[in-house]
Structure formats: structure tokens, C-alpha cells
Amino acid sequence: MHSLGARLNSARARSFVGREVELDCFGNAVRGDADAPFVFWLVGPGGIGKSALLRRLGDTVRAEGRGLVELDGRFLGRDPADFEDAADAFVSVPGTVLFVDSFEHCQWLESRLWQRFLPRAAPGALVVLAGRLAPQPQWTADPAWAGLLQVRELRPLSGGEAEALLEAASVRPERRDAVLRFAGGNPLALTLAAAADSAGRVGAEWTPSAEVLRTLVAGLVGEVPSAAHRRALEVVAQAHSTTEELLAAVLADQDASGLFQWLRELPFIESTPLGLYPHDAARETLLADLRWRAPTAFQAMRQRLAEEYLRLLREARTERVRAVTDDLFYLFRDVQKLQRTRAWVSAEEDMYEDALQEEDHSLVLSMAEQAEGPESAELVRYWLARQPQGFSVFRLISSGRIVAFTTRLVLPAPPEDDIDRDPVVAAAWQYSQETAPVRQGEHIAMTRFSIYPERYQVPSRVIDLSNSRVQAEAMRARGRAHGFLVYHDHRAWAERLQGVLADSGVRCEVGGREYALFTIDWRKIPVEQWIRHLIDATEMPPLSGPSGTPRPAFDQAVREALQLWRDPGAFAACALLRTRLVADCDDPVQGLKELLRESVEALAGDPRGVRAKEALATAFFSGAPTQEAAARRLGLPYGTFRRHLRQGLDLLCASLWEKELYGTA
């Protein structure tokens, strides 16, 4: 019995046509031809067949018994150390072959690759890079690489090759002319059109236009087996990559395993070690179709994905936070509010965030003085001594040179002597005290410095990376009150941040320069609600000002209190203690614990709440380390347990909200 993976590989091999020159040249290199190139660089537009060719080359590597490392540029982190760890066998195991697909997504690695990594290759190693962009001219012109590098631009298939592909795909002879007229020699379009023909959806009147490609992909999706399959398509179209676990979390009541296998077999879906993703052209086409066909469902799925990423952020290990944050904000790449504030990816700013080392202090001080003057530099010196852990530097990937730094401060209440030293921090504390005072156990957070001398005070990769870290920290922080960003060019940033952060109206001066504070009160609008407004592109509620307890914030506070049940220190600072529920208790912490237990027990009095009560009590009060463990204790499938838990949380929040409004009697 052959595995599904083996069957898929066999089918792809049977349908592969053309590329004989590339196959022959690479085959000679794998077999040890001393005159063969060391680096093969495959260049071509989306859908031209780069990934398909890599799979065939991989078959050649495995047939020769050589080690193969396969990486995908879409899923590589921006720290060069991550790439080198993943490709370690290339420098440590003789004869290893390294493949990097979608290299345009990690083009920032190119200089480091030539200068530092490739020269360390183990004996007999080979490299194949596939992407949409050609190598930088200095490498193709370098005499040292002249005999070691071969760049191959993949062209559309010839007429004969395209016909052979359709024959291998069992396209009916009477349909082939229409398919060829539509698809030309583009392998992706041919494959999609062949799949459409097998479903009887190719007509002789079709022509190769962008509109027809959109119709083709919509036609391939066509009549899906069920509503659950349609929901699975909505997930895979929007998520950066889709795993079976993500499907199970977002579609909790469905057969995630069956849906995942169905997605995997679709002709426009690719498989990677991190999950499934649609080919770029197919994803954009599928998204356009979903937006047009079911805009409400499209937005609802986006929200559900965001909520799942938020859950992962709260539970993820520290090293996973950035990856989950990237997945979260990938959903928002078309939201106008974020487009105003972010530079996204810039080829001129290939950098990564790193921890500040003591030997870098003098450079950081010099940057501060260059950008903001000697008074700011002295404040940087002060914070280096007070909170060195709040500093991050940003290094160019190609050289490791530091080009920028940021300083993120965490300032607990009550404030210490810092307010006497730093006028910006003093202004933030004064604003907090005048609007919604920070209480014992809470803190404010501030990006105090964001210094990038080459691109000071404009959207940049430094600000993108720093703000992503700030947002991730806000999602995971406990007891966070106000968050602040500080900008000198406040008129421009007030326009960029409209609807994202509130302009506090506070202006303060350091060294003759005026700075503005932009803020959000995370007690007033929970992170989840803030994210939801970004997704929906709807008007934000007030982001700062006199604090209240709106229903969404109250529900989030209930969930937070349950999550913090076994952490006495964090529970004692939870937001639910600031509600009316325990306003009259002599011991608010103990009173809240008793109220939560009594309210959960009371759910069993409602027929709908019996299983919900069991799920809540087991998940939060029994000591079960994870939700999976709680499900096992109750003898329930994980999806069923999650459903009971969600119902229990909804019932509990509704019950406590009644008490908040009308008292606990």
C-alpha cells in the first residue's frame, strides 16, 4: 500500500514535461562531473514551473543516494542564524544538496550567502536556488564565480511540450486546442486548465486573460462537496500557511483531517513542512472570488483566524512569538490603516532585530546624538543603566552592521525617580494620572526611542519590526495600562496613526525638540477588540481617556482571570478586580475567587450548562496543565471539549455581566 505522498509524487513525475537541459546539467553535477556548476539559479515568473522542476531535481538527488535539504523562502525567519541552522548539513555533511525555493522571499540573504555561507560548503555539496529575481550583477560578473554559477531563466513550454503535458493529464483531444489557446505555455495555467477540463468546465470560447484565469480558479473550486469544504478554502486562502491543527482550531466541529487531505490534493495547493499554501497567483484569484462571492463570510473567517492567532500568542513559547505575530499581521496586509504606518518589506532595508551587547553602547549613544542631540543621548545613557533589557539593535543581514536601535520601557506603578529625569516619561505618567490612573500591580509601556539615523521618523523596516514586537508584548502582557509611542514629527504621524492610536495631545520638549505621545489604554479596549476593528476597517472606539468597563472588555477580563487562576501574583492584578463585582469585598482577591467558583458551579442548574460547567472547572480549577489534558480527564474529543468550553465561557460571562450591572444578590 503506497502512501498518499508517494502517490502524489508519482503522479507529478508522470505529468512533468520539458526542461531537459536543466535536468541533464544538474544530473551531471549530482553524478560528480568536475566541470559542472556548484550553484544552479533558476529564475522565472510565478507559475512557470520552478517548484515542479525542483521536485524532479529532488528525485534525481534521492536516486543518487545523496542527502537533500529543502527550504522555502516563504517560511524562513529574518535571523540569518535560523537559515544556517536549517541548512547545517550543507556545511557539515559531504555531498549534501541544498534547495531553496521561493528565494525572492528571502533575497535579503543573498550577500551573506555568497560572502559567508557558500564558501563553507562541505566537499561535494551543490546548491539550487529558485526564485523570481535574478542574482545581483556583482556575482554573475565576478570571475571567481564564473565557472561555479549557472543562471537558468525558465521559459514557457514549447507547443509540443504543452501538448505533451495535456496528454499526460488525460485532457480529451477535442479540448486540447481550447486549453492551449487559453494557457499558452505557462505550466501552472496548463495544469489548472487540465484540471478544469477533467471536471468538464473548459469551453472553446475561453481566451488567456486575467479575467479568465479568475474564472478558471473559481471554476476549479466550483461545486465543493460541502459547506465545511468551502470554509476550509476560506482558511487556506487567507492564512499564511495552513496546518491540520489550524483547521481543527478554526473549524472545531468539522473533520479537520479529511478537509486537510482534500485541500492537499487540489491542483493549486502546495505542501511545505509548515503546512499548505496556495500558489501565489491562485491565492490572489481565490481571495478575489471569495471577497466577491461572500464578503461577510470572508470577514468572519478573517476574524476567526485572528482570534486563533491571538490565542497562540498568549500561549506560545517566546521564540515563537514573532512567527505567530507575522502570521497575524499577514491577514492585515491590505488594511489601509496599517498600510499608512508600515513600510512592509523594503529591499534597501534588509535587517533583523538583535539584543544589545555592552560593547555596542557607545554606538547607540552616538546614533542618539546624531539623530536627536546630546540631551537625548544622555537620556539614552540613563535608560541603558536602568533598563538595558529594553534595548534592541537592528543589523543589516548582509554585513551584521548595526544601523538602528529602539528602547521599549516597562514602567510599573507607582512611578520611581524616572519621572524626574526624563520629561517624556514624566509627561506620560501625568497623562495617565489625569485620564485613567495606573493602579498598584499595573504598568505603562513606552517605545521611548526609535533611532534610525538614515530614515529618521519615517515608516521603515525598523519601525515595522519594533511595532510588531510591541503588539506581541501587549497581547501577552498582564497588568498593562497605557501603551505609548513617541514621535518628533508628530504632525505626519498623527495622520498616519489616525484610527490606530490616539494622539494624547501631550507635547514635551527635550533639547529644543518637541515630541508627541500617541497612546492606547489596553484596559479600555482589549487587544482582541482593537485587532477586530483593524480587520473590519471600522471606526475605533475611544482609545484613551476616562476608563470604563464596556462589555467586550468585561468579557475579556473574565477570561483573563480564569487563565491566571493558578498564578497568585498575576491574579491579584487582573482587570476583573477593578469591576463592581468585588467593590464591597474586604478581600477583593479572595472574594473574586469565591464568586468565580460559585458562578461556574451555578451553571449546572441550567440544562445547557452541565457539560459547560464540567469543561470550565476541569480546564481552570482542576490543575490540568493544558486544554488537551482537561479533555482527556473528561474522556471527550478535543473538538467537543473546546465547544463545551466556549459555551461555558459565554454563559459565565453573561451571568457575571448581570451581576456587574445589577449586583451580586
Image: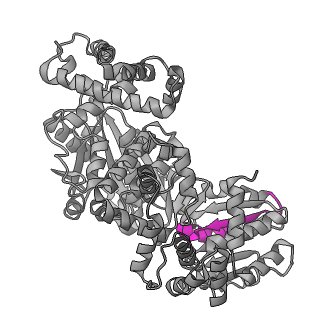
Q: Residue at point 81% right, 75% down? A: 27
Residues 495 and 429: in front is 495
Extent of the magenta region: 93-117
Furthest residue in direction top, as rendered = 586
- Residue 344 placement (x, y as % from top left): 40, 64
Name the quadrant containing residue 59: bottom right
The secondary structure that dominates the magenta segment is helix
275 over 40 or under it: above or below: above
In this image, 87 relative to 545: left or right?
Answer: right
Q: Residue at point 39% right, 79% down? A: 211
145 over 341 or under it: above or below: below
- Residue 82 placement (x, y as % from top left): 61, 54
Name the quadrant containing residue 143: bottom right
- Residue 541 placement (x, y as % from top left): 17, 47
- Indicate how the structure is coloured in the image: one colour
Furthest residue in direction bottom, as rendered = 159
Q: Residue at point 53% right, 73% down? A: 192
Q: Is residue 398 visible?
A: yes
106 over 247 or under it: above or below: below
Q: Is residue 37 visible?
A: no
Name the quadrant containing residue 214: bottom left
135 over 292 or under it: above or below: below
- Residue 375 placement (x, y as % from top left): 30, 54
Residues 278 and 501: in front is 278
In this image, 272 relative to 341: left or right?
Answer: right
Q: Residue at point 25% right, 51% down? A: 533
In this image, 494 relative to 206: left or right?
Answer: left
Q: Is residue 583 highlighted in magenta?
A: no
Q: Is residue 110 highlighted in magenta?
A: yes
The quadrant of the picture occupied by the C terminus is top left
Residues 348 and 589: in front is 589
Residues 10 and 582: in front is 10
